[in-house]
Image (spheres, rainbow, N blue to C red):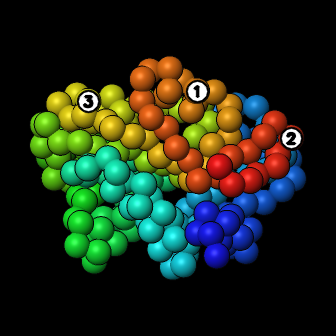
């Protein structure tokens, strides 16, 4: 079975993808809601997402994977662990919304080094605001971003903006304006 198709099925089975009328944090309403954490904290869902993302990342020779907390945290962890198990270790990084108020005052947690190739991930791309914040934090550390990934692209402008900025963007699932969610 196609892994992306199974990810869509798991999303429905776990309640990560539900239909109705929902208020979005990015503003506006939607006929569906996607809670990627319900997918990526499910054992099979985490494995499937990590497996598909890792297959994509192999073509980009990345050193690390990073994303905005909290939506990307389980994705980053699953990909990092699976990459080690498959003999192609990729470090995981978590990007805070704000620098830590104590200690080292870090915005990025994890083994980041200038010059690394860092893939940026999130569970959902709507306006792209959280992706852009993570991208900027990684660039501020002197790293290159070869690709940006999401599980679901809501097609609400964020992915287009990522591409307009000159970055490659891929998602596993896409939604249309009436709430249909399909394979990308």
Horizontal and vertical percent position of residue 172: 59, 53
- Marks 1/2 in contact by CB < 8 Å: the verdict is no
Residue 182 visible in the shown view: yes
Badge 3: few (under 14), some or many (20 or more) residues near its Cα, within 10 Å? some
| Residue at (68, 35) in percent of width and height | 155
- Where does label 2 land, which residue? 178
Q: Residues within 10 Å of mark 2 (few under 14, many from 20)?
A: few
Query: Quick check: 16 left or right of 160?
Result: right
In the image: residue 2, left or right of residue 150: right
- The residue wearing badge 3 is 139
> What percent of the width, then of the height, locates residue 59?
34, 51
Q: Secondary structure at mark 2?
A: loop
Question: In what quadrant of the picture does the N terminus appear?
Answer: bottom right
Mark nearest the camera among 1 and 3 is: 1
Does 178 sit left or right of 73 as displayed? right
Please tell me which of labels 1 and 3 falls first in the chain. Answer: 3
Q: Residue under circle 1?
A: 160
Return the disc, 1 or 2, that comes first in the chain's sequence. Answer: 1
- Kindly report the distance in space between the C-alpha atoms of the residues bearing marks 1 and 3: 20 Å
**132, above or below 119, in the image:** above
How crowded is the residue under tag 1: few (<14 C-alpha within 10 Å), some, or many (20+)?
Answer: some
| Above or below, comparing residue 140 to residue 32 in the picture | above
* Residue drawn at 71 percent across, 70 percent down: 9
Q: Dot 3 lies on which element?
A: helix
Q: CA distance from mark 2 to mark 3?
A: 35 Å
Residue 168: quadrant of the picture? top left
Q: Dots 2 and 3: beta carbons under 8 Å?
A: no
Find residue 3 and report its horizontal and vertical position in percent.
Answer: 58, 69
Name the spot of residue 113 as percent of width and height, x first.
12, 43
Q: Nearer the viewer, mark 1 or mark 2?
A: 1
Q: Earlier in the sequence, mark 2 or mark 3?
A: 3
Give the mark count: 3
């Amino acid at each position: 079975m196609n892994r992306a198709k199974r990810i869509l099925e798991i999303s429905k089975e776990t309640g990560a993808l539900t239909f109705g009328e929902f208020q979005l944090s990015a503003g506006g309403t939607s006929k569906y809601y996607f809670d990627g954490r319900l997918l990526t904290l499910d054992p099979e869902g985490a494995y499937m997402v990590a497996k598909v993302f890792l297959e994509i990342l192999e073509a980009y020779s990345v050193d690390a994977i990073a994303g905005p907390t909290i939506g990307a945290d389980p994705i980053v962890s699953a990909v990092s662990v699976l990459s080690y198990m498959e003999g192609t270790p990729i470090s995981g990084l978590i990007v805070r919304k704000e620098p830590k108020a104590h200690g080292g005052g870090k915005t990025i947690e994890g083994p980041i080094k200038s010059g690394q190739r860092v893939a940026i991930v999130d569970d959902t791309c709507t306006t792209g605001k959280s992706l852009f914040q993570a991208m900027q934090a990684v660039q501020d550390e002197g790293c290159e971003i070869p690709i940006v990934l999401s599980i679901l692209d809501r097609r609400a402008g964020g992915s287009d903006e990522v591409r307009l900025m000159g970055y490659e963007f891929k998602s596993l699932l896409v939604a249309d304006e009436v709430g249909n969610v399909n394979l990308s």
